[in-house]
Image (cartoon, grey):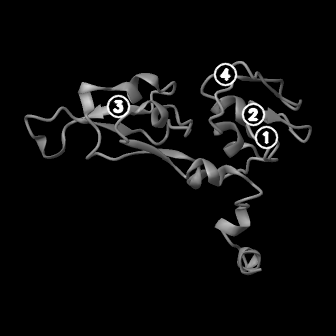
Amino acid sequence: MAYAIVENCIGCTACTKKCPVEAITGLRNEVHIIDPELCIDCGACGAVCPPEAILDEFGDLARTFPRKELPLAHVITDNCIGSGCELCINICPFEALSLTDAPNNTEDYYGVAEVIAKKCVGCRLCEQVCGWGAIYIDPPREMLKKDIYPIEVLTPKSGKGLEKTSS
């Protein structure tokens, strides 16, 4: 089952801007629709949806993240083979990865992938294509579910989250 948008969608278009495969359509101020044939179940839409109106592939409500905590790719430089591969760079629809110089400018090493944070939507395409375990998205997929990790548990304000975690 692909991601789906429920009736409390406000038509803000945040999801359409973050979808790496343009699977979401709809007019402003109207309920949007996700094309299940195009959806890759990445979760980028659910992480930015203000009214939390998106169900994941299991039918669980996706939770919205504050801008500074949105899913983002991270590179493990020791695992990246750089210019011998470039699969993550080639698959990224937002051009959020580039090749940088090798650490310490060693001659036998061909650089590593680098994340351009402002362009990354955390869609997980790079994570899925990397066969060397050199790139991952943080937070992990499991953290995208509202029922499991409501915002108050992760970012307590005025003790609200502390009450929920202690019960």
Contact between labelled residues 1 and 2, with CB atoms less than 8 Å apart: yes
Contact between labelled residues 3 and 2, with CB atoms less than 8 Å apart: no
Dot 2 amino acid type: Tyr
Disc 4 to disc 3, C-alpha distance: 22 Å
Disc 2 to disc 4, C-alpha distance: 13 Å
- In terms of sequence position, does the residue under pointer 1 or pointer 3 come before the other? 1
Q: Residue at x 76, y 31 (%)?
A: 1
Residue that label 3 marks:
98
Contact between labelled residues 3 and 4, with CB atoms less than 8 Å apart: no
Disc 1 to disc 4, C-alpha distance: 15 Å
Residue that label 4 marks:
22
Secondary structure of the residue carrying tag 2 is loop
- Residue 66: which disc? none
Contact between labelled residues 4 and 1, with CB atoms less than 8 Å apart: no
Label 3 Cα neighbours within 10 Å, binned few <14 / some 14-19 / many ≥20: some
Label 2 Cα neighbours within 10 Å, binned few <14 / some 14-19 / many ≥20: many
Quadrant in which the C terminus is drawn: bottom right
Q: Which numbered disc, 1 or 3, marks the residue closer to the eye? A: 1
Q: Is residue 151 above or below residue 95?
A: below
Dot 1 amino acid type: Ile
Dot 4 amino acid type: Glu
Q: In the drawing, does residue 92 fall left or right of residue 56?
A: left
Residue that label 1 marks:
54
Dot 3 amino acid type: Ser
Residue that label 2 marks:
3
Q: Is residue 164 above or below residue 121?
A: below
Residue 70 position, x and y percent, is 59, 49
Label 1 Cα neighbours within 10 Å, binned few <14 / some 14-19 / many ≥20: many
- In terms of sequence position, does the residue under pointer 1 or pointer 4 come before the other? 4
- In terms of sequence position, does the residue under pointer 2 or pointer 4 come before the other? 2
